[in-house]
Amino acid sequence: MVENLEAANRLWEELEPGQAWQIATRDGCLFRAPGMVGTPASEAEADRLLSMVHEDEVDREAETQIESRLSEARARTEQAHREVDEAARHVADMQHVLETAEAAKEHARRRIRNLTAQLRGLQAEQEATEQESGQLRQAVDDLNQRMRTHQDSERELQDRRSKLESRLTQLRTDADQADAHDTTSELAEARQNLHETEIAVQKVAEQVRRATAAEGIAQGESGRVAASLESLQVQTAQLEQEVRILADQQTDRSDLLASETERLEQLGNTTRIFLDRHRELDGERQRLHTDLNAVQTRLARIEMELEIAGTEQAALPAMLADDLALMRGEAMPEADELQAQERLARCRDLVAAGTWQPREDLPQRKGLRQRILRCGTVDQDIYLAFKQQQARLDLLVEQLADLEESENRLLAIAEGIDEDLEMKTLAAFDRINQGFKAYFGRLFGGGRAWLEFAEPLPDVVPGVHLFVQLPGRPVQPTFALSGGEKALTAVALTCAILNFHQPPFCVLDEVDAPLDEANIDRVGEVLRELAVVTQFLVITHNQKMLQYADAVYGVTLAVDGTSQTLSMRMDRTERLTGAS
């Protein structure tokens, strides 16, 4: 597009022959190789051309704005992807911290429960000790009263004995010195008095002996009671000290639990925020996938239309120029002789200069003009619509590439998680297998056992095979073992799993039912080792298993037909001897 004909002539002279080009002036003249094919149009036509030029400039500005918006959209998309990745990492970290805190919190709760149970037990023992101490003090007072009573009785009996012995001596003397002439009645009376006195002396002597023996027994019992009382006082002081220590520990644990609970609540709030953000981004991703599918469908349709329009677009400028020239030629009044003469003069100048050449495509051009006339006027918004659809297509293609890249990243992350999970599973399986071998050899006193993965099948999780070889026997399947051998094998596998992943508590229901006392001892020793971390609740009817328990709870049938629960806490001595 140039200002006037002079500028068009100067530009024409600079062009090389054989090139495909066209030049238009602002007053409506159109030049194309190899010559001028247009004339000045009317003022309305010129305005329309100027409007088209202005629209082209507006389209370029709109294209620049679209490219800028596309750049901003790319930046926002990349920022969103970075936020998603950062949120995913932060969520994973928060989940790990939350799991660790939950484990610590659960451990603290178990510790508090254990300390509370110990505190209650110590308080009960302290109350029992105080009650027993009161009973012993009362017994000591009773013994002291009895000793004082015996001492008084002993003194009275000693006095009576002395008097009776004196009387007996006097009677014997009187009997020996009695005159032979005394009467028989007096002698008989004296003998009777002597006999009664001897009997009374014997009774007093027996009472004195019994009182002395009772006093010795009371003194010995008083000493034992005093020793027991002193021991109970020492135990009471120790229990009070332990109660104070446990109360302080419980207070510390409660404060720690409160702080951990508050921290967990904060972490939970943060985690919920990130999870909400993650769900929003995931929803946005799903919406983009939905839009992408719709756009792909529309894109296929547009590509088909573009293939059809592409062929017509290649010839559109020439067809529009020819149509414009044709319209100008038809709109030119016949009376405009001056313009016709000017055109004729220019054509003669071109012929004289030797730049005019006869057109070989005139028949084809005439056919195109006829087709254009039959099609009618051309919609000027087609080019703008094409540019808009092309810009939207480029944006959707770019978004599709970003989504495919995100999908590839997510697939890589999922693949990494699967690999990590597989490695951890194999490591855990190996540790459980080693523990199973060790516990099996310990419970059976020899032999070997191991675990192996079964042959994997398509789309099926592989199973696990268990192999057992008892001492002095070949490898056997588990169904060929006896009831006790199956029970010991199951206990060995259970202990291996518990040793790998130590839970807070474990319930065993009559696992010792088919076992003899020797095997029960082995199982009991293994459970005592694992009970350092895990609390075992063992349901048993075997008296031998009770010696490994810290507390025993029994259910019996009362006289009225209802169930009654009995409990007993066992110390070390009772565990060693009480069950037998």
Image (tube, rainbow, N blue to C red):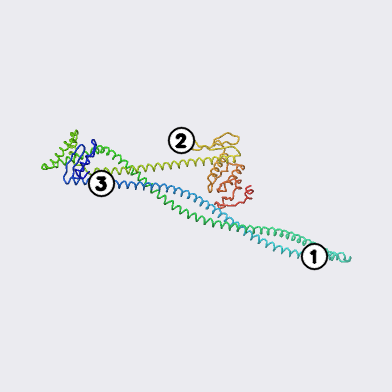
Quadrant location of residue 295? top left
Residue 124 vs residue 164: left or right? left
Please say if 538 is above or below 149: above
Can you tell which mark lies on residue 457?
A: 2
Please say if 96 is above or below 181: above
Crowding at dot 2, Cα within 10 Å, few <14 / some 14-19 / many 20+, comes out as few
Report helix, strand or loop for mark 2.
loop
* Tags 2 and 1 touching, CB below 8 Å: no
Residue 265 vs residue 515: left or right? left
Please say if 579 is above or below 201: above
N-terminal label among 3 and 2: 3
Q: Amino acid at mark 1?
A: Ser
Q: Residue furthest front?
A: 353
Q: Nearer the viewer, mark 1 or mark 3?
A: 3
Task: Name the residue that disc number 3 marks.
Answer: 57
Quadrant location of residue 130? bottom right
Distance CA(mark 3)–CA(mark 2): 66 Å
N-terminal label among 2 and 1: 1
Quadrant location of residue 45? top left
Can you tell which mark lies on residue 513?
A: none
Crowding at dot 1, Cα within 10 Å, few <14 / some 14-19 / many 20+, comes out as few
Report helix, strand or loop for mark 1.
helix
Q: Position of residue 152 (x, y in %)?
A: 73, 65
Crowding at dot 3, Cα within 10 Å, few <14 / some 14-19 / many 20+, comes out as few
Distance CA(mark 1)–CA(mark 3): 151 Å
Q: Amino acid at mark 2?
A: Leu
Q: Position of residue 281 (x, y in %)?
A: 38, 48
Depth check: give the residue in front, 580 or 264.
Answer: 264
Residue 535 vs residue 11: left or right? right
Residue 370 vs residue 537: left or right? left
Q: Amino acid at mark 3?
A: Glu
Task: Name the residue that disc number 1 marks.
Answer: 162
